[in-house]
Image (spheres, rainbow, N blue to C red):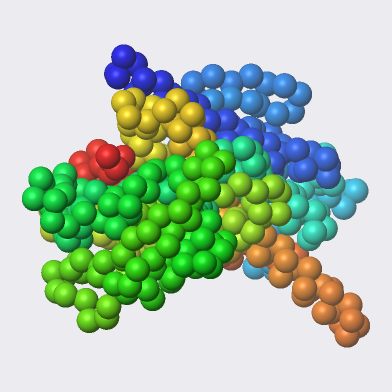
Amino acid sequence: MTVLLYTLGVVIFFTAILASIGLHELGHMIPAKKFGGKVTQYFIGFGPTVWSKQVGETEYGVKAIPLGGYVKIVGMLPPGAADLADEVETDAAGNQFLKVRKSNTGMFTQLISDARAAEWELIGPEDNDRLFYKLPWWKKVIVMAGGPTVNILIAFFIFAGVFATYGNAGDRKVETTIDRVDACVIPFEESGRVCTADELRDSPTPAYSAGIEPGDRIVAFNGTAITSWDQMQDLVKDNGTREAEVVVDRSGERLTFQTTTTVRPPDKEGGKTDKNVGFLGVAPESNPTTGGVFYTIGQMGHMTVDVAKSLATLPAKVWGVAKAIVGVEERDPLGPVSIVGGGRLAGETASHDEISVQDKTVSLLMLIAGFNFFIGMFNFVPLLPLDGGHIASATWEGIRRAWAKVFRRPDPGYVDAAKLLPVAYVVASALLVMGIVLIVGDFVVPLHLES
């Protein structure tokens, strides 16, 4: 049963991620077609084609390596400036298409020329009015932002559903109801062990001695009405070793207990506390905070800050994974994982014996939502070949043209994204290396679900 549940968790996770990839690409394709662009391919995955079908002018299919997807939109790169003019032929109607490719000197110049030629070799005169680079800048932004926006929306709807029903386990509300009553005073570094008979006799906690039980809701302490657990903690600490009157609500009945708060036990370093701090010996209930749409938006705002910080330190964290692979250091349990690591965590969650079905479902949903949110945010990074690079390029085109219009200057024309291809290749290479390191790390030094 454990193996079956583990496999089920992995399958659910990978199916959800593949569906997210497909929806991401639809986020690009639908607005591109809506704006009159020509989309010739829609594929999930990379590498050899496993299956495909031609529907109209678009080929839909699946490729062998399920680590992404793409849509081919015709005319992403303009034909080039004056130095490439002899590559472009203009027909009688004024339409431009690539005729021949000339040789260029310089590695980067040749690279740009080759990419431009590959872009244009399948473009005919009939495609002249449907080229992507000719779209208004704001339409290009919508097309390129559509993909990562879909991922963020997927994350939002999952988060909103979980937060509204189950609650946010990462944002727990501490109640005034008692969840646990410690039987005796145990030093912090020994917490978790069972009290000995001598400890129960010689150093029982004030709450245990008084008869306070789990499930009791504290309503007053020394005559002060209790409205929050923080307030309760402050009152107990300030009480020192003095006597205390604790009023609780037990199943609708008010009960009053007389006790004496003892001094807090040794701290986690093993030393005695300097202050005469009161100690009752109880732990409160804490429940996941629930909330609706606006709560979800606020939480995703905090997540955005966290993801931005993670992206800024991603290369360093991946380097840490590389060192863990060769045994130089331990892998950071809070570090990044690949889709392989995500699948392992999903499998361990689904097969864990001590997690309820409800908690397993919520954990899998949150894992899927977290991956989608990260993918969406990552694709908004303003660097080619990421979607954010195309968004930045189109936005800059809009700014340049607006500036020229305001100051009555000549139209500067389209932004030539091809000139940034050297940067795109460097970024793509770095992403490939980091992806490989994370995948290897998830096999060699995998992260596991906390017990």
Seen from this angle, which residue lies furthest bottom?
A: 407
Does residue 217 appear to the left or right of 77 in the view shown?
A: left
Residue 205 percent coordinates (x, y): 26, 56
Q: Would residue 447 be visible to someone looking at this image?
A: yes
The foreground one among 115 and 73 is 73
Front residue of 272/31: it is: 272
Pick the quarter of the image with the N terminus: top left
The answer to whether any part of residue 336 appears in the image is no
Q: Position of residue 284 (x, y in %)?
A: 42, 52
Q: Nearer the viewer, residue 396 or 199?
A: 199
Q: Residue at x 38, y 27 (%)?
A: 350
**Residue drawn at (31%, 65%) of the image:** 260
Question: Please, is residue 297 above or below residue 447 in the view?
Answer: below
Q: Quadrant of the C terminus?
A: top left
Pinpoint residue 281: horizontal percent, then vertical percent: 31, 57
Taking depth in this image into account, of 252 and 16 the one nearest to the observer is: 252
